[in-house]
Amino acid sequence: MRGLMSKDFFTLKKKYGWTRLLIDIAIMAMLMFVLEDKGALLISFLLIPLEIMSVVITLATCDEQWKWSKYAISLPVSKKQIVGSRYGFATLMASTGLVASLVVNTISYFYFPMYAYGFYIFVSLASFAITMLFVALILPSNYSLGVNAGFVMMLVLLGAVLLLGFWSSKHENAILRFVVDHFELGSGIAALALIMICGLSYALSVSFFKKKHA
């Protein structure tokens, strides 16, 4: 699986080089400068999940263009491992997003200290959870109906985040207040639900991949 994940890394490196990373850093800096305390929230709950979803879609697109799956099934690895490597790489990207979110939230805490530092850590962890949820919803779409289905799912999820954010801001940050009021119970339920959704997502993706390459 390490070799398959390395292939995904080199695919992205060939596709984007370091240009994409530098652009992302510039966008983050601009958002922090313009939006101040709200910049870290926008980066954590919108930019980072969007970037990771874009990475997943890009890898699926390259796989289709290069007919990678037909070659991959001839390798001495199982179909479960082929699918698992994509989930592993997506998790690695989401973890990178977690680190980026921690960095911007730490900067926000020192320059725009509106909440305790624990709140900013929670925002970073929530960003990771949202990213993993989005990945778990997109990957089965890719394996079942192709890249276009995954792209449509990405747009739907992006729209859902924007609508929830708009609704929450119009109701005095109702979502954040709910999380604070029910932190322990909500965190436990959310973590359990995320694990179950990711497990189901992986099982569905393996099933779809096996059917497609029976």
Image (cartoon, grey):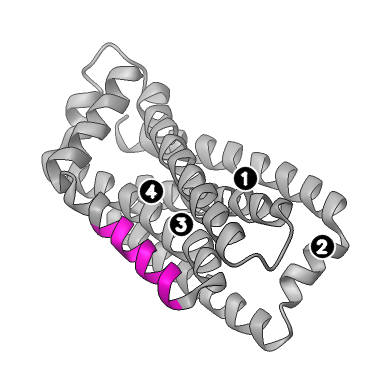
Identify the residue under disc 4: 144
**Neighbours of disc 4 within 10 Å: few (<14), some (14-19), many (20+):** some
Q: Are marks 1 and 3 in contact (CB under 8 Å)?
A: no
Indicate the amino acid at tag 2: Val
Tell me which label, 4 or 3, sits earlier in the chain: 3
Q: Are marks 1 and 4 in contact (CB under 8 Å)?
A: no
Q: Is 31 one of the magenta-colored residues? A: yes
Single out the mark in the foreground, 4 or 3: 3
Q: Are marks 2 and 4 in contact (CB under 8 Å)?
A: no
Indicate the amino acid at tag 1: Ile
Identify the residue under disc 2: 180
Single out the mark in the foreground, 2 or 4: 2
Residue 169 circle label: none
Quadrant hosting residue 214: top left
Q: Are marks 4 and 3 in contact (CB under 8 Å)?
A: no
**Neighbours of disc 3 within 10 Å: few (<14), some (14-19), many (20+):** many
